[in-house]
Amino acid sequence: MTEDEVLAEFRASHALLEGHFLLSSGRHSGYYLQCARVLMNPERGGKLARALVQKLPRELRSQIRKVVSPAMGGVIIGHEVGRALDVDAIFLERPTGVFELRRGFDIAEGEKILLVEDVITTGLSSREAMKEIVALGGDVIAAAALVDRTGGEVDLGVPFHALVTINFPTYEESEVPPELAAIPAMKPGSRK
């Protein structure tokens, strides 16, 4: 899929929002990608996951033994990427604010893991998730996301592949432009 085709899927599902948003990273933006909306249709979610998997080098795809995603945002796309790769897909949760593996999920010592996210904004959540995966014995060999909001600038310490790279500006609280500050900020993500 081309970037225009991917963005068309976001627009068709009303997942590309405009306004004033407080992102889970703590940064502010005039745009928000509500991946849950684009993934609510199973056919669309599967199509996007297959397109994301095709972005991964063939040699990398053959090494992946499990997909791990951070909850909430990465759960659906992680599951669909696992389906496309024909490997198990599990997720990490933050019931107390830090990622942990629950629900009887496990990671084998040295297991080759693909971390899958919906959107990368700063990479902080991904790095936190990878730290937990490594602590559990996993080997994170790459990361993937539907959307890279960093404009290709994020460094996760492993090869990173995104279906689409977008450079919507984001701002620290003190940098929010007046026209954006005039609009009440909404926090549409899953984290409070």
Image: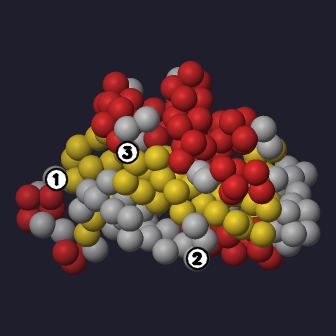
Q: Quadrant of residue 158?
A: bottom right
Could you tell me which secondary element the residue under label 3 belongs to?
strand
User: Can residue 73 be spotted in the picture?
Assistant: no
Residue 178 vertical placement versus 76 (above, below): below
Q: Relative to 132, is 38 on the left or the right?
A: left
Mark before the other along the chain sequence, 3 or 2: 3
Q: Real-space Cα distance between discs 3 and 1?
A: 18 Å
Instruction: Say what amino acid the circle numbered 3 marks.
Output: Leu
**Which label belongs to residue 170?**
none
Q: Real-space Cα distance between discs 3 and 2?
A: 25 Å
**Which label belongs to residue 157?**
2
Mark 3 lies on residue? 33
Q: Residues within 10 Å of mark 2 (few under 14, many from 20)?
A: few
In x, y percent, where is residue 123?
Answer: 49, 68
Q: Relative to 185, is 117 on the left or the right?
A: right
Q: Real-space Cα distance between discs 2 and 1?
A: 36 Å
Q: Residues within 10 Å of mark 3 (few under 14, many from 20)?
A: many
Mark 1 lies on residue? 183
Residue for point 57% across, 42% down: 54
User: Can residue 12 be spotted in the picture?
Assistant: yes
Could you tell me which secondary element the residue under label 1 belongs to?
loop
In x, y percent, where is residue 17?
Answer: 29, 40
Q: Residue furthest front?
A: 59
Quadrant housing the N terminus: top left
